[in-house]
Image (spheres, coloured by chain):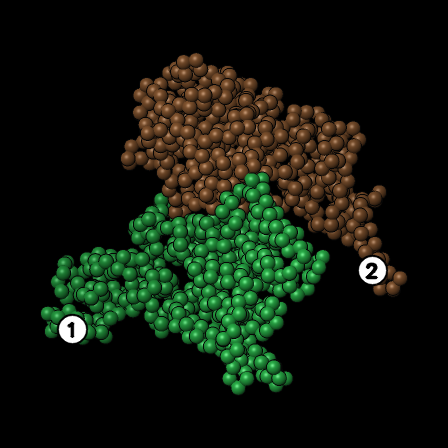
Chain colours: A green, B brown
């Protein structure tokens, strides 16, 4: 190869890596930044030595700890995009270098394909960081071994492999396989004893430690920390990559001469494969991109920040039929006093799951369902949901904040102090911990706080047993104890409106008065007007409220159009599009 | 030597010298005893207990403590942060020299270069040893779910803690209902729910799994108590419901909808109901044997109907005579009528000398661990007189267990934060009176201020019951031997 060609090779190679790195950052930052938001909110890394030791109780725990450490920095999603992109590119580069060591030729296809697959896997928001780190560490250590450890020092990784297994768990089997194949293809004098020593002590370590030390089953000891769920249920692709990397020394020994010799103007065609891979996977990732995930997590982020008006505005701009989005949006509406004004401006679940999430111990519902109870002042129940989530899934930033807030409201300061001590051991939540600390033993400060004070005042004073499997039933119990609870009143009416219960909406109008409403909210007024004008029952007592004339005019117009199209429901629905956010449209078309 | 290295050495020497210099002759007296945590002042401790490490909650730049026995043996500890970590070997020697006497703690705090000496406090060292182990279940004081759960064994003479069983070994199922036979220390049992479930019995180190729920039983066997002979285990079989309070501090109410007593014959692997006349009109639970095995104590409430009010359910204390030969029981006898004072009884535990019984007294129901008002009471079994124990606090006290020598009582108390139960140990003197209790000592004196899990059902043990994970796995994977049902 001429000097010019070598130079061209290097430039193309460099360009490919730069393009791969830049496009990966761009994708993870611009399209998929929510991945880092989700992952950061799914765990709570603590900086204490105790927390590290807790992870060292089984093989692979250290890798999980490392993954959590990295995830803590996803607090800034741009950092997440940068770090993950850099790691994936580093892995591609290391694979290329390993390939070069084995074949003495520049490698393009395998490194970029592996990198692109990792990018694809990482686009799933449930793909945990330790998976990426686990693979990267094996490749990195293998690279160090083949590059720097010769003769006697090459025994070091063989002898210490059980320790590496303890640190990185099942991911260490990638390195084991790479080493075995590397030895197999080498002409080393002691390759067979080395291979035996690599395998046998590790097997013995697993079996003996399984008997004597670890309570996990042998299957769990072999697999941990791998879990289908932590790959976002992408196990087939993940294992394909896992084994492809494990078998790298063998793959690099396969030579497809025809492709390798294919050149255009003396430049190998293989050099351009990275660009092809980037293009193909770029297209796949963009087509796979789930905008609804992005929207949901944006809503959740605004919700956690208590920016309720922004939650509503965002949902108005990006309407979503996602139940969880609707659930959080409804809380935002209730908190801002608009639930029964704008209920039908957003998609609602007919079974009321956008209003109340029924109790379940698994899945994502447990993480969020308690916010409804917090909103209406059922503090014990809100705490129970947060606590159960903590027991099942460990601490999360928002989970522990909910535990702190509910215990502060309940005045259990010594328990709060324990939760605060956990929050103080985090990287990015220390300021919040200090803020919470200022409320300890200070009921006045709690009452003066805009959020805690409001919830303290809303807190259910009369005791009853919570009906978590039937959350709507709790509303009646709360209102029986405190009919001035404006959030509970809104939820009561919202449920009746969803259930198309004209009669009870009308009958319960006095509740609005006791809860301090100055006018009848829009959706309730629509129900009342329809009920009155259609003579569906006893004429309602307006309790001093007046019905807006525009609502009456609007209903008459709606009814006229409806009557004109009554024989064709589809046509009527089309003709009444401008009434989509009204109770009348809900009654007839939902 | 380089100049910079010399300076570093001088700085390091000065620093360590400062750390190590304790109070000299010139100390100023400070009024009152120092604030320390845990509250280890004025307590009676066993001669073989692990060091009582503590933290001094007084402002200062340096701290020093001297602990002295009447025999003149002493330990000096210096600390910059106020954490007093007592050397284990010296502590053991000190306690040995002070058996039956007192040890005195002098606490010094340095402020602005001057040492202040607080009023000394002391501990009485009892010659009566405490059992070497305590077994408890560690779990989050949650409501419905669990993930990590384990039955742990702590060595009371050191800080060693080992898992008897962790639920990872049984598919993360619930592990519960551990029971040690205080009179026959080779007997131990625990229960596992779910796919690998069963009741595990340990006899002479052998671990075996049984299925005690026969087709005739509507509910499983729970709340086990070993007969002193080790030949029988009394259980209750309860149908439980749990409900969640919307606003009260106690959060959860756990109630029995029905319950009855059972007797398990270990050798015959058969289980029989314990019936009394009109048994179906009552709910019987929480069995407890007298140390001679001749009586079975239990708690009884009227059978509730469908429209029951949870706060009206009250349990009284009963007993029945047991004939071990015929495995038969006499008619029941009322021991303590708690209902008449508007209270309810649970967890009866008879002292090893059979002279007194300690129970938990609370306002209603049968599950006091969520009842803030729950306290420990004792009943003199000679004249049936009752009195509250001196160990109580404003928070829940329950799950108490006697040492085999009858001098020590371990119980759960939520006095720390109202949420997590902590094991407290109290000395019971020869007159049956309880002394000021102290919390189970930990190596890190701040341990309890961070630890979220609860210590559930602490029970003393003379034997080491920790198993190798492989042993438990093998036993758990085996098919449970089904118990046979036999009529009374």
- Count of marks overlaid on the render: 2
Q: Residue at x 39, y 16 (%)?
A: B328
Report the disc number at residue A323: none
Q: Residue at x 53, y 42 (%)?
A: A215
Whether label 2 touches label 1, CB < 8 Å? no
Give the answer, above or below, for where A219 lies relative to B100. Answer: below
Label 1 packing within 10 angstroms: few (<14), some (14-19), many (20+): few
Give the answer, above or below, for where A109 lies relative to B262. Answer: below
Label 2 packing within 10 angstroms: few (<14), some (14-19), many (20+): few
**Screen quadrant of the N terminus of chain B:** bottom right
Report the disc number at residue A571: 1
Residue A150 in picture, x, y percent from top left? 70, 61
Q: Quadrant of residue A323?
A: bottom left
The answer for how far apart the CA atoms under marks 2 and 1 are is 89 Å
Q: Is residue A109 left or right of residue B123?
A: left
Report the disc number at residue B8: 2
**Screen quadrant of the C terminus of chain B:** top left
Q: Are marks 2 and 1 on the same chain?
A: no
Q: Is residue B208 left or right of residue A570?
A: right
Q: Residue B347, can we see it?
A: no
Label 1: element kind: helix
In the displayed orientation, state which residue is furthest to the right. Answer: B1
Q: Is residue A463 left or right of residue B188?
A: left
Q: Is residue A547 left or right of residue B402?
A: left
Q: Residue at x 20, y 64 (%)?
A: A587
């Amino acid at each position: 190869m001429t000097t010019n060609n070598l130079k061209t090779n290097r430039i193309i190679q460099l360009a490919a890596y730069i393009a791969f790195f830049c496009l990966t950052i761009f994708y993870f930052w611009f399209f998929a930044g929510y991945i880092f938001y989700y992952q950061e909110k799914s765990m709570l890394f603590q900086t204490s030595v105790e927390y590290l030791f807790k992870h060292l109780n089984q093989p692979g725990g250290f890798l999980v700890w490392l993954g959590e450490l990295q995830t803590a920095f996803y607090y800034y999603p741009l950092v997440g995009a940068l770090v993950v992109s850099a790691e994936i590119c580093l892995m591609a580069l290391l694979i290329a270098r390993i390939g070069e060591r084995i074949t003495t030729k520049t490698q393009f296809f395998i490194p970029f394909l592996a990198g692109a697959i990792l990018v694809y896997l990482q686009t799933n928001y449930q793909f945990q960081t330790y998976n990426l780190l686990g693979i990267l560490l094996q490749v990195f250590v293998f690279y160090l071994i083949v590059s720097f450890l010769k003769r006697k020092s090459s025994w070091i990784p063989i002898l210490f492999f059980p320790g590496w297994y303890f640190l990185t768990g099942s991911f260490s089997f990638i390195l084991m396989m790479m080493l075995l194949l590397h030895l197999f293809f080498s002409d080393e004098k002691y390759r067979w004893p080395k291979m035996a020593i690599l395998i046998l002590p590790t097997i013995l370590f697993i079996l003996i430690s399984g008997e004597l030390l670890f309570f996990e089953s042998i299957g769990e000891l072999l697999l941990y920390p791998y879990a289908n769920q932590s790959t976002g249920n992408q196990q087939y692709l993940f294992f394909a990559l896992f084994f492809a990397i494990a078998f790298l020394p063998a793959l690099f020994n396969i030579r497809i001469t025809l492709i390798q010799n294919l050149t255009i103007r003396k430049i190998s065609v293989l050099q351009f494969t990275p660009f092809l891979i980037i293009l193909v996977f770029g297209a796949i990732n963009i087509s796979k991109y789930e905008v609804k995930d992005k929207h949901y997590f944006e809503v959740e982020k605004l919700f956690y920040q208590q920016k309720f008006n922004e939650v509503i505005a965002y949902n108005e701009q990006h309407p979503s039929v996602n139940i969880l989005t609707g659930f959080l949006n409804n809380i935002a509406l209730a908190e801002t006093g608009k639930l029964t004004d704008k209920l039908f401006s957003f998609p609602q679940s007919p079974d009321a799951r956008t209003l109340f999430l029924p109790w379940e111990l698994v899945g994502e519902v447990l993480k969020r369902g308690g916010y409804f109870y917090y909103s209406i002042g059922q503090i014990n129940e809100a705490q129970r949901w947060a606590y159960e989530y903590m027991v099942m899934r460990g601490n999360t930033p928002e989970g522990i904040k909910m535990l702190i807030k509910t215990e502060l409201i309940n005045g259990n300061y010594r328990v709060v102090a324990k939760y605060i001590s956990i929050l103080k051991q985090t990287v990015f939540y220390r300021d919040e911990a200090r803020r919470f600390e200022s409320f300890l033993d200070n009921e006045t400060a709690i009452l003066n706080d805009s959020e805690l004070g409001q919830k303290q005042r809303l807190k259910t004073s009369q005791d009853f047993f919570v009906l978590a499997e039937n959350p709507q039933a709790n509303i009646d119990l709360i209102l029986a104890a405190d009919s001035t609870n404006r959030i509970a009143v809104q939820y009561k009416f919202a449920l009746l409106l969803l259930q198309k219960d004209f009669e009870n909406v009308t009958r319960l109008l006095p509740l609005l008065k006791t809860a301090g409403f100055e006018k009848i909210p829009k959706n309730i007024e629509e129900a009342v007007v329809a009920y009155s004008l259609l003579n569906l029952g006893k004429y309602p007592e307006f309790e001093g409220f007046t019905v807006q004339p525009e609502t009456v005019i609007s209903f008459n117009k709606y009814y006229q159009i409806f009557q004109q199209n009554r024989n064709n429901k589809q046509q009527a629905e089309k003709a009444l599009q401008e009434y989509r956010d009204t109770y009348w449209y809900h009654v007839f078309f939902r | 030597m380089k100049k910079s290295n010399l300076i570093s050495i001088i700085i390091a020497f000065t620093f360590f010298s400062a750390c190590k210099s304790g109070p000299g002759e010139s100390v100023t007296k400070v009024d009152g005893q120092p604030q320390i945590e845990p509250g280890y002042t004025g307590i009676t401790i066993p001669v073989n207990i692990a060091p009582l490490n503590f933290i001094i909650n007084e402002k200062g730049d340096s701290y020093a403590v001297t602990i002295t026995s009447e025999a003149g043996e002493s330990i000096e500890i210096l600390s910059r942060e106020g954490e007093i970590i007592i050397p284990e070997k010296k502590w053991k020697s000190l306690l040995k020299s002070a058996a039956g006497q007192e040890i005195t703690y002098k606490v010094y705090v340095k402020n602005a270069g001057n040492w202040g000496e607080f009023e000394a406090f002391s501990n009485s060292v009892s010659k009566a040893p405490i059992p070497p182990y305590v077994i408890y279940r560690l779990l989050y004081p949650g409501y419905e779910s669990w993930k990590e759960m384990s039955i742990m064994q702590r060595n009371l003479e050191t800080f060693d803690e080992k898992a008897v069983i962790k639920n990872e070994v049984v598919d993360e199922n619930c592990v519960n209902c551990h029971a040690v036979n205080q009179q026959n220390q080779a007997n131990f049992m625990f229960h596992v729910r779910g796919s690998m479930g069963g009741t595990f019995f340990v006899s002479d180190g052998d671990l075996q799994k049984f299925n005690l729920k026969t087709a005739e039983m509507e509910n499983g066997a729970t709340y086990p108590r070993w007969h002193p002979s080790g030949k029988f285990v009394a259980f209750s079989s309860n149908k439980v419901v749990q409900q969640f309070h919307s606003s009260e501090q106690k959060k959860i109410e756990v109630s029995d909808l029905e319950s009855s007593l059972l007797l398990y014959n270990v050798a015959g692997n058969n289980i029989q109901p314990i019936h009394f006349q009109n048994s179906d009109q009552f709910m019987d639970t929480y069995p407890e044997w007298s140390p001679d095995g001749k009586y079975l104590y239990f708690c009884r409430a009227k059978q509730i109907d469908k429209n029951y009010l949870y706060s009206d359910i009250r349990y009284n204390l009963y007993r029945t005579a047991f004939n071990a030969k015929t495995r038969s029981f006499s008619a029941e006898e009322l021991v303590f009528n708690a209902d008449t004072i508007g209270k309810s009884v649970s967890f009866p535990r008879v002292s090893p000398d059979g002279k007194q019984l300690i129970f938990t007294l609370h306002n209603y129901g049968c599950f006091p661990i969520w009842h803030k008002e729950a306290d420990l009471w004792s009943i003199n079994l000679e004249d049936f007189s009752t009195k509250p124990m001196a160990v109580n606090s404003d928070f829940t006290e329950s799950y108490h267990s006697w040492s085999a020598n009858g001098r020590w009582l371990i119980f759960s108390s939520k006095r720390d934060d109202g949420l997590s139960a902590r094991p407290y140990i109290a000395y019971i003197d020869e007159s049956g009176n309880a002394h000021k209790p102290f919390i189970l000592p930990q190596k890190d004196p701040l341990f309890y201020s961070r630890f979220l899990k609860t210590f559930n059902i602490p029970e003393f043990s003379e034997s080491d019951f920790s198993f190798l994970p492989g042993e438990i796995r093998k036993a758990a994977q085996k098919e449970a031997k089904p118990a046979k049902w036999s009529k009374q």
